[in-house]
């Protein structure tokens, strides 16, 4: 076991989380699960509150409150679902723009961390991170939860998402 490597990874992960969270929550009327809800519904429009709560790892009442806040902010709308009992969730035009800004702020925050590395070091880091990411989920549900703040366009470019379950 390499205690120093594990510690360095932990510090880096925490710094990345803190910077990313601050970036994705800025400019949104609601924090918490709201940014991940927008990102997930941008990539997977028409999901239900139940599906969304599983991806976000929150309770049903918390998912309803998140959706209510996003609807009130004009970022999300409920539409009739497959049957009379269900509602599908869709981003509004403002919700799509907010998600695109969120992705840009996320990229800027994470690029700031990577700025300490030379281009060749970044190139060496990419395959290592792809291997780590590929090991983070064993099924589609786990992958969707893991990727709840991912920029789908960046991830699906060649060679594709390391978590093949997201397709």
Image (cartoon, rainbow, N blue to C red):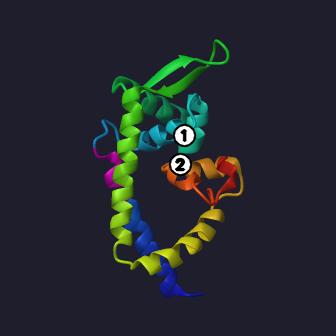
Q: Mark 1 points at which residue?
A: 43
Give x and y (percent) for residue 27. Answer: 28, 41
Q: Is residue 112 among the parts visible in the rendering?
A: yes
137 relative to 28, above or below: below
Residue plotted at (39% across, 57% down): 107
The image quadrant of residue 33 is top left
Q: Quadrant of residue 74?
A: top left
* Relative to 87, residue 18 above or below: below
Where is residue 24? Give x, y as percent: 36, 49
Label 2 sits on residue: 152
Magenta segment range?
19-26
Dot 1: within a 10 Å radius of its alpha carbon, few (fewer than 14), some, or many (20 or more) residues? Answer: some
Q: How would you rate the neighbour count of disc 2 (Cα within 10 Å): few for under 14, some for 14-19, many for 20 or more?
A: some
- 157 or 58: which is nearer to us? 157
Residue reaching furthest to the left: 27
Q: Is residue 144 above or below residue 88?
A: below
Asked if disc 2 and disc 1 are in contact, CB closer than 8 Å, the reply is: yes
Query: What secondary structure is the magenta-colored segment mainly?
Result: helix
- Most foreground residue, 119 or 39: 119
Q: Residue 68: percent from the left, percent from the top?
A: 42, 26
Give me the residue at 60% from left, 87% from top: 1
Q: Can residue 146 be seen in this view?
A: no
């Amino acid at each position: 076991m390499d205690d120093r490597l594990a510690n360095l990874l932990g510090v880096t992960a925490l710094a990345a989380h803190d910077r990313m969270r601050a970036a994705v929550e800025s400019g949104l009327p609601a924090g918490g699960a709201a940014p991940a809800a927008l990102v997930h519904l941008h990539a997977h429009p028409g999901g239900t509150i139940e599906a969304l709560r599983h991806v976000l790892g929150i309770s049903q009442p918390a998912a309803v409150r998140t959706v209510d806040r996003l609807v009130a902010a004009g970022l999300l709308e409920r539409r009739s679902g497959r049957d009379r009992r269900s509602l599908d969730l869709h981003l509004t035009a403002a919700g799509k723009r907010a998600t695109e800004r969120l992705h840009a702020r996320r990229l800027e925050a994470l690029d700031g961390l990577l700025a300490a590395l030379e281009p060749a070091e970044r190139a060496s880091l990419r395959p290592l991170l792809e291997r780590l990411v590929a090991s983070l989920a064993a099924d589609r549900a786990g992958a969707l939860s893991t990727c709840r703040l991912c920029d789908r366009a960046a991830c699906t470019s060649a060679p594709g998402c390391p978590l093949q379950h997201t397709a």
